[in-house]
Amino acid sequence: MLAGRGGGQRARTRQLPLPSTAPCPVQNPLTHSSHMSDGQRYNSPGLYSHPIPTKTPLHPSPGQYNYGGSQNVSQLSNYQGPGQTLNRAPVGLISVAPLQHTGSSPQMPPPSQNSAAISSAGSFLPGTNPPALSNWQYGQTSVSQPAGSQTSHFAHVTGAVPTQPSASSSGNTNPPTSYQYAASPGVPPLPNSYMKPGSAPPPVSQPLPSTYPPARPPLGSPPSGGPPLGRPTAAITSPPNSSVSQALLNSATNQEGKESVNYLFFLFTHPSPASQNLKMGRSVGYSYPSLPPGYQNTSPGVPGMQPPPMQYPDGPQSFHQPALGTNHLAASMGSLSLQPEGVRLVNLLQERNILPTTPLQAPIPNLHEDIQKLNCNPELFRCTLTNIPQTQALLNKAKLPLGLLLHPFKDLSQLPVVTSSTIVRCRSCRTYINPFVSFLDQRRWKCNLCYRVNDVPEEFMYNPVTRVYGEPHKRPEVQNATIEFMAPSEYMLRPPQPPVYLFVFDVSHNAIETGYLDTVCKSLLDNLDLLPGNTRTKIGFITFDSTIHFYSLQEGLSQPQMLIVSDIEDVFIPMPENLLVNLNENKELIQDLLRTLPQMFTKSLETQSALGPALQAAFKLMSPTGGRISVFQTQLPSVGVGALKSREEPNQRASAKDIHLTPSTDFYKKLALDCSGQQVAVDLFLLSGQYSDLASLGCISRYSAGSIYYYQSYHHKHNPVQVEKLQKELKRYLTRKIGFEAVMRIRCTKGLSIHTFHGNFFVRSTDLLSLPNVNPDAGYAVQMSVEESLTDMQVVSFQSALLYTSSKGERRIRVHTMCLPVVTTLSDVYLGADVQAITGLLANMAVDRSVSASLSDARDALVNAVIDSLSAYRASVLSVQQPGLMAPFSLRLFPLYVLALLKQKAFQTGTTTRLDERIFTMCQVKNQPLIYLMLMTHPSLYRIDNLTDEGALNISDRTIPQPPILQLSVEKLSRDGAYLMDAGSVMFMWIGKNCGQNFINQVFGVPNYASIPQNMTHLPELDTAESTRIIAFISWLREQRPFFPILYIIRDESPLKPSFLQNMIEDRTESALSYYEFLLHIQQQVNK
Ligand SMILES: [Zn+2]
């Protein structure tokens, strides 16, 4: 396509291999700095820099354009790349059976969405200055959501969308019949049909005056009635409920006969090796070890504040898996009711040992067990408030943020996959049929998001699982909150693209000196056959320094041919047809190149970096197909477009002000948006010992839905532990699942509205996220507000739908649906607060705030979130004022987690955190699933010199000890012991001075403490029980995450000890308050 252009473009060709492999004599002094040396010092001046926060909104204006990575719904995009038109003739990969209802064309996005986007954007355009919010995290009461977003969901609802959403907004004129199990507006709701009883307010409160609206019967038992012990009688006897729940059970347990289904197939995805590792998640129920002496929970009779195990199915339910028995669930629910832990009030200043000794679980929504049983796994889909406030006013009162945290493409060990010519969706809002819709009768179902009554297609009447006709409510789509559809042709804008991988390598002198290219090429060689793909997979390579080098891998060549383009002002692509080649057909040439590349530039003295032009070239090369660009960069780009200048001033690192968190150029963002339009994602591997302006470079990945990896001070000789990390993470990166040309839409029940998105993507229209690539390790978050009162609604639902092309060329849709109860009282809102999800969402918001305002503003806002919510709780829920700092049980860890955020690299002040390191941590906050974000914020500390097999896990013949989690305080350390701190991407093993010689002997293979090597990063595998246990435990922790934590073994006098101590969140440092001091500060503010 670029052939025939003349002018100053010059291309030279030369044959490989090139120069000899003599090492370059010039050393780059900048690569020698040790990894930990800078970040660990405690030389900051001053104390906690903002002890008395001023109240400032975190979001100056919703919808304001920002570089923080979150994107508001308002963004208008013209990035409708070629092939995005929906009118294109479908590509017939799957024959489509005649649809019963012709009115719906299941396309994504529906045309109405675009107009909605345009109409809604007006009030949010940059410069229009919507009214500032009085309170940063609580949605947008003062900003009325434009009508467009309603239109997008509800434009076709019969009877329009009234301001009074109650009564007949659904257009439901048909009385419910026996299949209904959702209370429908317009008819009296069935009491208790969704709600589990027992949502009583904290016992310390006086019984609250009834605040139920007249038209609405109370949910569950009256607040003053105390938690009942079992299921409500209504639920047992009422025909609608019991018939359905019985049906659900039948269907879930009757799995036979699916092999011979004619037109509907269930496939179960083969778990990848990684997913097998992941499937034994930490939330899986297992028996926990008993508490250690001296570490007792003060809550009476409740070990570890742990909800009973087996509350959630492990991953989405599959048809092979017998359903969790009602009895089992009823028993655990009953035990919950007997121990109303959740309604307990905690005096934080008195109860110091509030940290559970086992990983904190997500709260269980207060739903009827038959509904909850079908709910989405919280590892995939989670809400900050599992009790949704009925009105925005109530939400505002609670002073807690409302939002969702998603991990939509997580590796799953079992995933039901449906191939059907009819994907049943709501004709009005396009919601996929799901477990929380209601069947009015066999022929009609009511959407749980917009309440439109839809016809059940003829095909859907047949249940392939039971091979029975007339059981639409037993279909897998209605039995699984997580499900994947094979998409028919109308979901394709063009034929599914082949997997295309382009690698772009920095080969400047600096890059070669780090030795990274050798590691990367070796990893690629090792994993070439494991790249996800099929016979259509294509691959290509570009290298660059001050010029750009292409590699022709044309069939018939005896060796790869290098083509150098030295005109970086207007890069052209020589021989584009031979640069991206079929992997299978040209494997030998490709292997040849990978073996040769690391040696080719060893004599190069070229120090310049033309990253921008190289990325432009990569984009041009990839545009026709889409795919993935993996770029490896080791320094600040210095020539051509996108060249950057150093902005880091080490003297100002300690200051929370005037640090450069925003990009210095919009080049990388613009190019990312071009990439996004052509279904190209760019993953950035930054391996650098010097400042490289990740704030600017990171935009290339952030807006193209790529990933960012950062290896600070990577050097193959001076920092060998990084080499192993890169190898391990590359293996995961190269072999993990990948989805191409993806879009994701998140829908929620009418009345709720999503207004801000966090993560790596581009918001293409109101609620459509453009994800040129989607990977299983990416997390997302959204903020929501209550747009219209949820009057008469017992429950609301949320649904994410991810449409993508698999590496095998199939178009697939992965759908997750979550259902949550609606509550009317403040105490119920607090009761359902999910403190981890709240912390995760606040962290995302704080990154935006750091970028749009300042780090100190973000820190103040975080502290205010604690003060405001606990003040509101004190003022509005507690009827008897007590001394101390009172928190609802659900929020007992909130101050601790916020303090942990303030001490985290992204938000800390007063240390010498490098700017790129801070930016990278912010990228992680934005892009990591909640479980990893929490671990890097509040690490887990274990004592490991006394591990036993008691309560251990047994996974494929391995015994994995499960030591209790300790509080992060040196008070918990004994000089007689050894401890492991798991901070997510890094682990520290601290050995006390008086640690038993036997242990040191058995684990390190050395005679005594003094002979433990200083810079140890590996444990020897010794044939002792102690060694086996510790290695099994550490390996198990590592296997569960997609990145590789480095293990630093430190003695008491180790120079790395400060890094270890820095993670002791509860302790005071020179620059930050201790947990207790923080609590006192909060108390002072709350009691004002
Ligand atoms: Zn609908």
Image (cartoon, rainbow, N blue to C red):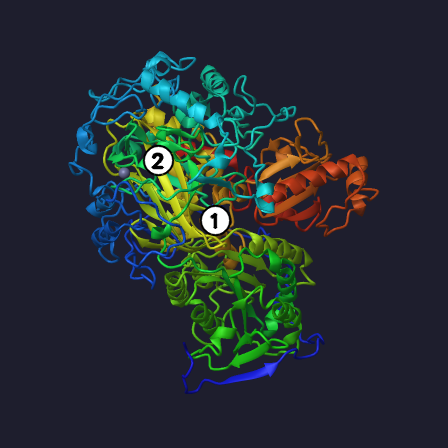
Q: Nearer the viewer, residue 907 or 587?
A: 587
Please indicate, yes or no, whether residue 938 appears anywhere in the rendered image: yes
> Does ligand 1 reach within 8 Å of label 2's beta carbon?
no
Q: Secondary structure at mark 1?
A: loop
Reply above or below: 638 against 364: below
Please indicate, yes or no, whether residue 1078 appears anywhere in the rendered image: no
| Mark 1 vs mark 2: in front | 2
What residue do we see at 20% from left, 45% from top? 147
* Left or right: residue 893 compared with residue 1049: left
Quarter location, residue 199 = top left
Give the image location of residue 98, x and y in percent. Answer: 31, 45
* Left or right: residue 778 compared with residue 472: right
**Image mark for residue 778:** 1
Q: Which residue is mark 2?
A: 460
How many discs mark residues in the rendered view? Answer: 2
Q: Earlier in the sequence, mark 1 or mark 2?
A: 2
Mark 1 vs 2: CB contact within 8 A: no
Give the image location of residue 845, x and y in percent. Answer: 39, 46
Q: Nearer the viewer, residue 1059 or 818?
A: 818
Q: Nearer the viewer, residue 721 or 1074?
A: 721
Q: Amino acid at mark 1?
A: Ala
**Quadrant location of ligand 1?**
top left
Q: Callout 1: few (<14), some (14-19), or many (20+) C-alpha neighbours within 10 Å?
A: many
Quarter location, residue 953 = top right
Give the image location of residue 372, x and y in percent. Answer: 42, 27
The N terminus appears in which quarter of the rendering? Answer: bottom left
Q: Nearer the viewer, residue 333 or 297?
A: 333
Q: CA distance from mark 1 to mark 2?
A: 33 Å
